[in-house]
Amino acid sequence: MAEENPPHRGTSPSRYLATRLSSLKPPLTRPPNPIRLLRSINRTQWAFFAVAFAAWTWDAFDFFTVSLTVSNLAETFGKSNTEITWGITLVLMFRSIGSMVFGIAADRYGRKWPFIINNVLFMTIELVRVTSLPGWIAKDKLRQADPTAPTTRGFTQTYSQFLTCRALFGVAMGGLYGNAAATAIEDLPPAARGLMSGLLQQGYAFGYLLAAAFTRGLVDTTPHGWRPLFWFGACPPLLIILFRLMLPETETYTQAAAIRARNENASKTFLAEGRAALKTHWLLLVYLVLFMAGFNFMSHGSQDLYPTMLRSQFGFSQDQVTITQVIANLGAMLGGTVVGFSSQVFGRRLSIIVMCVVGGALLFPYTATSSTAIIAPAFFEQFCVQGAWGVVPIHLMELSPGAFRTFVVGTSYQLGNLASSASSTIESELGETFPLPGGDGVERKFEYGKVICIFMGCVYGFVVLLTVLGPEHLGKRFDVVEGDVAEGVASGSGTVAEKDSERGAREEGVVVGRA
């Protein structure tokens, strides 16, 4: 049974650093039967997981609609590919605002209503671009008769409006990850969390897969160009909202709220907990932001410009790009699930490091194979990228202070996104310094593959270094007890060590009482 205090608590800096390599030794616990783990999850827990998975999937779907239509958007707005990638950068930059606002709201007022409001905002911003649809259709008919006639195509008619919409999307999308992770995982049986963490993270890869498929079906197959893809993206959040309305609060949050309710001023207690958490865990929070910056550089650096590379550098058709992206994301989904589950046996940090090393070895074929044989390295490269990511949700939750789990998980993730927000723009800018011969005179070709390969090699090295130096709390319990909810809040004159001891004793009593 895991201790409540992390293994590194109370160790000196020199002792901590001296144990970073030895602590990578895998526990090699007997792997649980995955079928038995899945059967241990009750219907309510499955419902929480399903609604969180659906929301995270659609978050990824909308994000990748821009990555998959960079060339189309550049043609519409008369801009370069690099200028269009600022739409990706702005989303990543503004997501940190949403994560802080909705993260604090979810920890203070519950997981349910911030989740619903978040999705309402997400859907509303998307629908803004559809409000002038009837007029646009009428003018489109007029344009067929007179090609010189002006046309209004939804709200986003200029490059500036496009960037504004993407920035607002960043706020809406940023609040989702922390809440989704807490909703999906915190009530699960401890033994099932590694497996389900890997499955949850694959909502990202599944969203990318759906975006690739619907891009092929909706983009440039109608007179409306790329816009039907974005209109379609506004619909599923309504179903996700209805699904969440039918579910209660998570049991973990309900217990925390009951404990806070015993105090005369719950808001004052919540703020006191926040001050104590920042005072006690500030170094951990800084580490998690850097850690997630590396992971976001890893995913966006390997994915965002990849479709553009396939089309521009290797001359792939739209069908070939779609097939490559779908196969790559099947590898991603498999990798996240397998490695997330395996991290229960081999440890969180060691699992991440192995995936980074193998992924680094695959970079050259991933970016230099110019035929359709690139499908194989794309499958295995994304297996490694999302394999490492499959460990992230549970690893972050195990390291986070319990009273602020949603805020810490969501904000560290989105501040990492902020730090890595310019990854696609950086790659595009650098790629354009390596022009290729053979352009058609309209679209210039650039050697994006070389830049992606070098960039990702540096990112893998950074993530490995941070993972080796970082902490791990494999198997941490999420049971809510008063000491956890009011962590660090002065309730007497005892020392931190004494309070930790008392908390551990209370939790042992809780566990024994439940056995």
Image: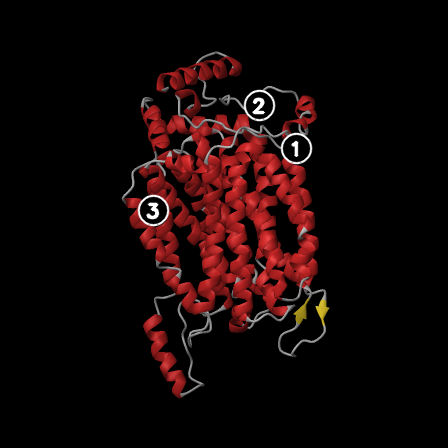
Element type at marker 2? loop
The residue drawn where x is 64% and y is 68% is: 314
**Disc nearer the start of the sequence (3/2):** 2
Residue count near mark 3 (Cα–Cα under 10 Å), binned few <14, some 14–19, many ≥20: many
Residue at mark 3 to residue at mark 1: CA–CA distance: 38 Å
Element type at marker 1? helix
Residue type for callout 1: Leu
* The quarter of the displayed image where residue 490 is located: top left
Image vertical order of residue 14 relative to residue 442, above or below: above
Residue type for callout 3: Ile
Q: Are marks 3 and 2 in contact (CB under 8 Å)?
A: no
Q: Mark 3 or mark 1: which is in front?
A: 1
Left or right: 397 as drawn, with respect to 457: left
Left or right: 24 as drawn, with respect to 117: right
Residue count near mark 2 (Cα–Cα under 10 Å), binned few <14, some 14–19, many ≥20: some
Q: Are marks 1 and 2 in contact (CB under 8 Å)?
A: no
Residue type for callout 2: Pro
Residue behind mark 2: 7
Whether residue 164 can be seen here? no
Task: Name the foreground residue: 378 vs 270.
Answer: 378
Residue behind mark 1: 469
Image vertical order of residue 492 relative to residue 68, above or below: above
Task: Name the foreground residue: 322 vs 143.
Answer: 322
Residue at mark 1 to residue at mark 2: CA–CA distance: 14 Å
Residue 48, percent from left and from top: 36, 41
Q: Mark 3 or mark 2: which is in front?
A: 2
